[in-house]
Amino acid sequence: MAQVKKRRILIVDDEEDVGKTFKMILENYGFDVDCFTDPIMALKQFKPNLYDLTILDIKMPYPNGFKLYNQLKLIDSNIKTLFITALSSVESYNTENYKVYPLRGQRHYVKKPVSKNDLLRQVYSMLVGQEYEDDLLE
Amino acid sequence: MNLFLALLQRVNSRVILKITLLVIIEIGLICGSFYTLTYYQSQGTSIGNLINAAGKNRYLTSNSLLQTEKFLDGSSNMLRLKTASDILGTNIQALTYGGTISGINIRSLPSDFSSYLSNVKRDFSAYKALIDDKVIGQSHVTLDTPEIGMVLKQDLEASASNLIHSSDILVTALGLYVDNNSQNLIILQIFLAVLNIGILVLILYLVTRILMPISVLTQATREIKKGNFSYHVEHKSEDELGELTESFNSMIISIRSYIEEQSRLTHELRMANEEILQRERMKDEFINIAAHEMRTPVQPILGLSELLKSMRTENKAVVTKEDEMLDMIISNAKRLLLIEENILNVARIENKLLKLNKEQCDLLEIVSNVIQDAKNQIGKNKVEVRYKPSELRTISVYADRAKLTQVVFNLLNNAIKFTKGGSITVDLEMDDKQAIVSIKDTGVGIDPRVEPNLFSKYITNSSSGTGLGLFISKTIIEAHGGKITAFNNIDGKGATFRFSLPLVDIGISQNVERTI
């Protein structure tokens, strides 16, 4: 397993099992993970420089992933965010916010369900800034 | 005059008739005024001539008296006496009946002066009678007796004096009349001038009124040009301008109602369009949400199975039955996703919601990526993939990258599935107009019973679960303006799937969303 510096990740997904799955996978690969199903709760305990990465679901009751992202950005302007959604077309879900945060062709955007390796590849590339190699994980 | 009337009848215009009538009235008025003034002036002149004639009475009477007295004195003869009284008689005759005196034509005296004239005539008769009876008729008596001659002279002088007096009265009366007449003439001149100016102003006003609609209509056309279709021209007359105004107003009304109808239809169309769009949005939203709901539970199944599998392989090197079970869970979860994706795509196609997000992309890169991603499956199925795109650097097409990837993935996936242990040749060709991708396998080939309906959506085959992939691929390729074909290889081993795509046309390379 690749030894990387222990990084802290915030996961917000209103589907408890989905959030838990991500948490379990990431913890298994050495990350420190906080998982929330309620975006408000996540926002309440969020502090600058506390997390290295946030993984946000887009379709959530309130606020949705885009709005939450905007709020988090206000608190920590350097925060890196990975959106994970089961929506096939983000545009039709929320046009207004789509304009704020264009996702088409965006690197930090993966579709659910995401395979374990795809998730790790994305997280590694965002945090370490280098390509993740499958061999290291097998 | 008849010619003029005929001309007017031929001019079939009430406006021209009206104006002509007004001009005729004005000309008549001017002529009338002129005639009246001329008549009045000539009246004054003829009275002046009469004054001359009447004034002559004084001299002629004196002359006659002088000749009579000379005759009585014996210093003149009878002829001179008679001539003098005849000239006087002729002058009075001319005053009564008119005639020529000293080359001047005079009219008979107007009846207003008949009483003065009858006085003159009476006095002349008395005088004449005296001369005729006492002088001419008894000349021998009077000549002999000087006393009688004195008396006769006295009588003659008295009678002549009467005649002169009554003539002078006539002259005075005529003079007064002329004086009056010239004053009246001034008044008449002023009156006629005022009347003429008044009528002229009235006629100008009427002409303006007749022609007024022209300027009003001109103004109206200006308003209409500005788009003010509620404009209404107020004018009523029996002529063509009235008719023109009326048809102009009704023209505006029909234009207005036409425009209103147009805008109503446009509005209805917009509403209908809005409704269609709304319905489409709702369908799109439904499919989107349905997809979300279907995918969400797969995440824990897939993610946790994969995690579990890797946790197990971390601990031991031997592949157990449990590992095999996990693999089956994972592959079936993935298959479920594929099926779900295909069904959703069919739903999108059927509801005309499949949208192309076209951008300039490299077909070569897309094909290479798909082959790269299929590495695992290729290995599992022990297939050899031949792919040598070396001579081509890029194949630029204007397409939806994700959808095109899906097509290549579908075709390659099918080839792999049906070619266990064989080989697959992926070829890329390019000419001026199009790029062609062909995937040739050495697999089982296409069942001749299925071939005619290979790309139709209800074809299923046992291995792939749903045959929707080919239907979706065909729809996507055709939406890009390309063509997809499939045929069994001539050597009898396997099949070839081939699709073409038009190359980028720089002129239309904008990112337009297109609904299929």
Image (spheres, coloured by chain):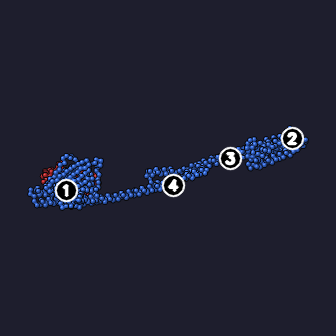
First along the sequence among labels 2 and 1: 2
Give the CA separation, mark 3 to mark 4.
48 Å
| Residue type highlighted by circle 1 | Asn
Task: For mark 4, name the chain.
Answer: B
Residue located beneath label 2 in the image: B72
2 or 1: mark nearer the eye: 1
Are the residues at dot 2 and dot 1 in contact (C-beta closer than 8 Å)?
Answer: no
Residue located beneath label 3 in the image: B40
Q: Is residue B450 visible?
A: yes
Task: For mark 2, name the chain.
Answer: B
Give the CA separation, mark 2 to mark 4.
95 Å
Residue visible at 51% across and 50% down in the picture: B214
Give the CA separation, mark 1 to mark 3.
127 Å
Secondary structure beneath disc 3? helix
Q: What colour denotes chain B?
A: blue
Q: Percent position (x, y) of residue B443?
A: 16, 56
Q: Percent position (x, y) of residue B512?
A: 29, 52
Are the residues at dot 1 and dot 3 in contact (C-beta closer than 8 Å)?
Answer: no
Instruction: For label 2, count other residues whose C-alpha is less than 10 Å away and answer few (under 14), some (14-19) or many (20+).
Output: many
Is B272 left, or right, of B134 in this rendering?
Answer: left
Secondary structure beneath disc 1? strand
Secondary structure beneath disc 2? helix
First along the sequence among labels 2 and 4: 2
Q: Quadrant of residue B422?
A: bottom left
Q: Quadrant of residue A32?
A: bottom left
Q: On the same chain: label 1 and label 4? A: yes
Residue visible at 27% across and 51% down in the picture: B358
Residue located beneath label 1 in the image: B488
Residue located beneath label 4 in the image: B243
